[in-house]
Amino acid sequence: MRPRRVLSAALCVAIASLGISAIAPQAGAATHSSRAAAPTPKLDWKRCGGDNQCAKLTVPLDYDHPDNGKTMKVALLRVRATDQKKRIGSLLINPGGPGASGTKFARDFASILPDAVKARFDIVGFDPRGSGATSPVKCEDNLDGVFSADYSPDTPAERADLATRLQQLAQSCEARSGNLLPYVSSESSVRDMDRIRQAVGDKKLTYLGYSYGTYLGTLYAKLFPNKVRALVLDGAIDPNLSAVDVGAQQAGGFERSLDAFLADCSANRRCSFYNAGDSAGAFDRLSAQVDAQPVPARNGRTLGGGEFDLGVAQALYSGKEGYTRLEQALAAAARGDGSRLLALSDEYTGRHDNGSYDSSQPAFWAIGCRDGPSVGGPDAYAAAEPQFSAAAPRVGVALLNAGLICAYWPVPPVADEAPIHVDGTPPILVVGTTNDPATPLKWAQGLAQDLSSGVLLTAEGTQHTAFVTAFNRCVDDHVVTYLVDLRPPPSNTTCA
């Protein structure tokens, strides 16, 4: 699993997303809670490796005009409950992104879920529209030029170069996927989720969403409050923050995580990036060096500024568990070998050894830019740079400009609606981690308040997300009890 832009051991700083982009999370909320009744969809499950079963679910391409005959097929993967006699139903899961493959996630993740969950639920993953095997968005085949760009431009020439690369990228996405781009919003994926619920035979939805996946869960609760059985929203996004506030606060989270790593390394002579106790100074010098001149790497490649930021972010998603890998990658780059940081960047962006990319990054741009609201045009991004720089001197500007492609996106964002507040659901469990680099704890606190039945569970830790991923028995036990028995912990419970 790739560390999540979201779970991935990589679910979603820098250039393309950071868990969620600076502009993605506040998708426009729908004004219609239902559409015309449709026949219960059918699934034809077939074996697809080991005990896995795969199917394709036909859904309307355009939910505003569901009867126009245009459809798409959503890819599903199911791992059957180990105790069919005591099976409760299906647990629909999403790893985040936006754009991460839910079928791959289900295949990799089902085996490490707690036994009580595996026994009582079929684990069902889906590729959200525009990603994986569900009508994937296609842009440029080779994205190396996108990720090697300088997202913290210091000169007019660098700013113009970044703008040119992103304009060309947006044009390529339109040329290859223009007919699909209007239909990949999060709201459409949530309506797909309700079709999946019906197709697997569940009267109500049981769902586990990480990072961006918490936004899908929140939208589902808003659109279908009477169809909620249990929702676990881990690494939560507060949908009622402005685009700029989301980006600046996320940048601050990664900055604090990076500061903690550098302080730890400076205090530990065994850290390979110790640098006589000045790891922070060494980091800044290395960052400036890469910005001025890319560092050579294996196979004739080089490590550029954008890839440097992404590689650092990839390691930080794992919190303290990623420190060793990060220190070794930085030390190697300081010696003139950028290969390790480049490998981390490749994990983040979905780049394969042969130079091709998986579908996650184009889907990330397409969904994030469609959801909106955007920061604005190019001038609005430039105007926001001082706020991001103040919030996160090392990573803030790069994170802001990770969303700059939306200033050139060919499809306008979904209209911004009134703030999201959800009523009429059973208890919904919201999980936040104290020092999560990608989704700050205050977002989980805010979401729990946005949900009238929200129950906040706080995990102490430094990594992105907590259930299963943090090896925290207290968190795992509370989530399992909630999923199986529908008994959430007391609100504001903290797990050390």
Image (cartoon, grey):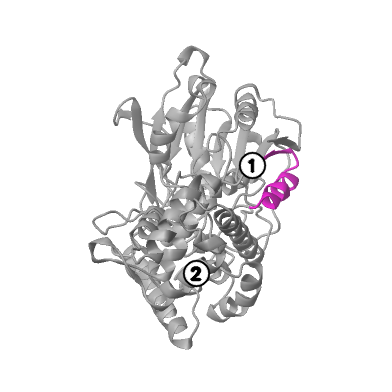
- Tally the numbered discs: 2
At label 1, the amino acid type is Ala
Which is nearer the eye, 79 or 211? 211
Q: Position of residue 402 (x, y in %)?
A: 50, 67
- Nearer to us: label 1 or label 2: 2
Q: Position of residue 322 (x, y in %)?
A: 49, 48
- Mark sitting earlier along the chain (1/2): 1
Name the residue: 49% across, 53% down: 271
* Image mark for residue 195: none
Which is nearer the eye, 172 or 459? 459
Would you say 151 lies left or right of 299 here?
Answer: right
Where is 141 relative to 292, above or below? above
Residue receiving disc 1: 221
Q: Quadrant of residue 458?
A: top right
Would you say 148 lies left or right of 449 here?
Answer: left
Name the residue: 37% across, 76% down: 293
At label 2, the amino acid type is Cys
CA–CA distance in space, label 1 to label 2: 27 Å
Regarding residue 200, the answer to whether it shows in the image is no
Regarding residue 94, the answer to whether it shows in the image is yes
Q: Which residues are magenta?
A: 440-459
Describe the element under mark 2 as helix, strand or loop: helix
Name the residue: 47% across, 36% down: 196
Are discs 1 and 2 less than 8 Å apart at CB?
Answer: no
Q: Position of residue 319 (x, y in %)?
A: 55, 48
Describe the element under mark 1 as helix, strand or loop: helix
Residues packed near mark 2 inside 10 Å, few (<14), some (14 to 19) or many (20 plus): many
Q: Which quadrant does the N terminus fall into?
A: top left
Residue receiving disc 2: 406
State yes or no: residue 451 in magenta. yes
